[in-house]
Image (cartoon, helix red, strand yellow):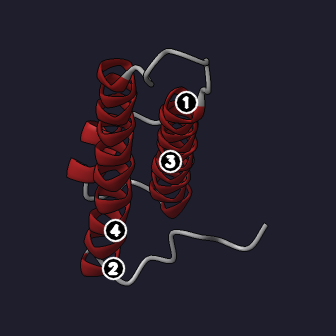
Amino acid sequence: MVDPADALQNPITGSAERGQIQRDWIAASAESGRRAKEALAKTAAVLDENVPGRRPDTELAQAWAEVAQGWANLSQAEATRSIAAAAFAVDQGGINTFPNN
């Protein structure tokens, strides 16, 4: 794994290293998005739980919704960093960060 702080500050960082950073961030963003969807599904399950004589546990549903929001925020942050890394790489000389393998 490439250290993002070093790679993005180093003017001689290779395109493969920058590309790996972006792929890592994209993967992290996708994972955070997946976890957000799971937490939202748990929220819906709590609200949909039908137990005769018992109201849905809205506090638990709210907690799961907040967890989902946290994961969604992380997903957004990872995607934003990936875009910033791409812009940085282009600014440093038009480097293609997604080399053809």
Residue at the image point whose x is 57% and y is 38% from the top: 41
Residue at the image point whose x is 55% and y is 30% from the top: 42
* Quarter assignment of residue 69: top left
Give the CA separation, mark 3 to mark 4: 16 Å
Farthest-out residue, bottom: 94
Please state which amino acid type lies under the numbered disc 4: Ile
Instruction: Say whether residue 100 is left or right of residue 46.
Output: right
Query: Mark 4 highlights which residue?
Result: 83
Q: Are marks 3 and 2 in contact (CB under 8 Å)?
A: no
Q: Residue 45, relative to residue 78: is it above or below?
A: above
Give the CA separation, mark 4 to mark 1: 31 Å
Q: Earlier in the sequence, mark 3 or mark 1?
A: 3
Give percent across and percent down for residue 40.
49, 40
Please state which amino acid type lies under the numbered disc 1: Lys
Q: Residue 49, relative to residue 24: is it above or below?
A: above
Please state which amino acid type lies under the numbered disc 3: Gly
Q: Earlier in the sequence, mark 3 or mark 4?
A: 3
Q: Nearer the viewer, mark 3 or mark 4?
A: 3
Query: Mark 3 highlights which residue?
Result: 33
Q: Nearer the viewer, mark 2 or mark 1?
A: 1
Query: Mark 1 highlights which residue?
Result: 42
Q: Nearer the viewer, mark 3 or mark 2?
A: 3
Q: Which mark is residue 90?
A: 2
Q: Are marks 2 and 1 in contact (CB under 8 Å)?
A: no
Q: Which mark is residue 28?
A: none
Mark 1 falls on what kind of element?
Answer: helix
Q: Are marks 3 and 1 in contact (CB under 8 Å)?
A: no
